Image (cartoon, rainbow, N blue to C red):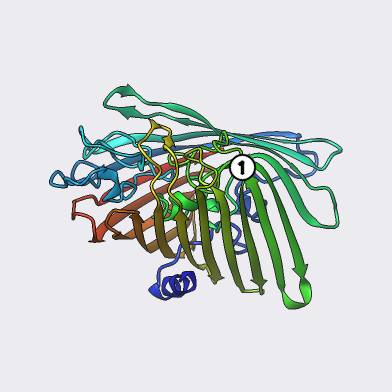
Amino acid sequence: MIARFAIVAALVGFARAAWAQAAPDAEPAAENENDSDGYTPPAGGPGAPPLSIDGYIDVGFARAQGDGTSFSPNDTRLPVDYGVDTFAPAVNSRGDVASTEHGDRLVNGFLPRSVGIGGRPSFLLNVVALDLKYAAPGAPLTIFTRLLGLPRFSDQGDASRFLVEQAFGRLIPFDSLELAIAVGKFDSVFGIEYLDNESNIRTGITPSLIARYTTGQSLGAKVFYRLQIPAAWSAVSINAAATNQGTFVESLQTADASLTGEPVLSARLGYELNLPHVQMKIGASGSYGPRNDQSDRGAKLQLHGLDFRLAVAGVYLNAEAVQVDEDAGAAKTTPSGPQLVASGFHARGFYAQLAWAIAVDAGPLHKITPYARYEQRQAQFEGFDRITVDRITAGVRVELWDSLIVKGEWLVNRELAGAPNVANNVQTASVVYSW
């Protein structure tokens, strides 16, 4: 099934730009980590101080149609979040939506984070990110921490949060091997979209419809190994982790504590072809273990996925597909508190995106990247209707000097089957300052 989705995704004709580790002219900062930790700032040159402080500020402006949700006022099914895609009207790189306001209707915790603007146009301070990286002198050890400030507002007042998104130590024990061992809280190892989690790296603004399953941070241990095959211009790699929770985003499953006492295992096996003018990467991912939103360790969560990246002459094609299966479990625990039940759940989906990075030498203007993405998602809670939605996304990214990125994006959300048709398209923009 996943293979069919991957083929369909590749044929759709839209694929996400591979800014992270796809080609020699991709973002240099992303290349530094070799697919092992996702993005961290690049190492300094000779004589650089062991401690580096980096970060970015993401300022947005967004407008969503309707009331900023996917809920229909005429939908009487309960829980109301089981019959729609609550993540569809995303407005920023974290996948926060314009609103999750559901009135007094019953929900069961299948909700994203919200910026609380509803259908009103508004400026937003999406993220304030501070990165601290320390390279221990005389030891093959790097310590990295990413701290996020997330100013937010809700109908109940201030809903701002301070989040430790990553905090890990990474050991590279052998000079002669591309082997890295990390312990702490780090990005997912599943698929490729986690490489673009940060606003200053992501080509566009919003994550895909399947990002909720694959781009969350996890707390535990992981190992990355890559074997170069110079005669074939190739390399193979394995990225594996044992963590408190799998790869779901933190609004669905917490990473900070194990609710079952049993780890989740995740891994990606990758192959890359690095010809002088063509780069291609293919990967297969899997994850298995207890779902970490309830206490029954017998309730399992498993994911399977395929990913593909191609870079040729400034054109970047990315595609990814995933299948998710969750057993029914005990009472559900979400960031908003205990819910009724952890229902059985099944989903599958894919995205594909095409981008063209156009180098420009015109004073402060360095690069213009138009892009388009198509994605589709099918999902069903056991005992409820299956819903099918898709999204067409188009946008442009403009890079000015070395520290300013301006993006604009338009999302067309469509309910294809099982969910009520609502006006939930989004227009969003983002200005990212990096240091």
Is residue 218 visible in this depiction of the protein? Answer: yes
Whether residue 255 sits left or right of residue 344 in the image: it is: right
Picture coordinates of residue 270 (x, y %)? 64, 65
Residue located 85% across and 51% down the image: 174
Q: Is residue 58 above or below residue 300?
A: above
In the figure, 132 relative to 45: above or below? above
Q: Nearer the viewer, residue 314 or 105?
A: 105
Name the outermost residue toward the left: 74
Asked if residue 36 can be seen in this view, the reply is no
Q: Residue furthest top?
A: 157
Q: Which residue is mark 1?
A: 262
Give how far across and how far down residue 319 sits, in percent: 48, 66
Percent x, y of residue 352 = 43, 65
- The N terminus - image quarter: bottom left
Q: Quadrant of the C terminus?
A: top right
Q: Total number of numbered labels?
A: 1
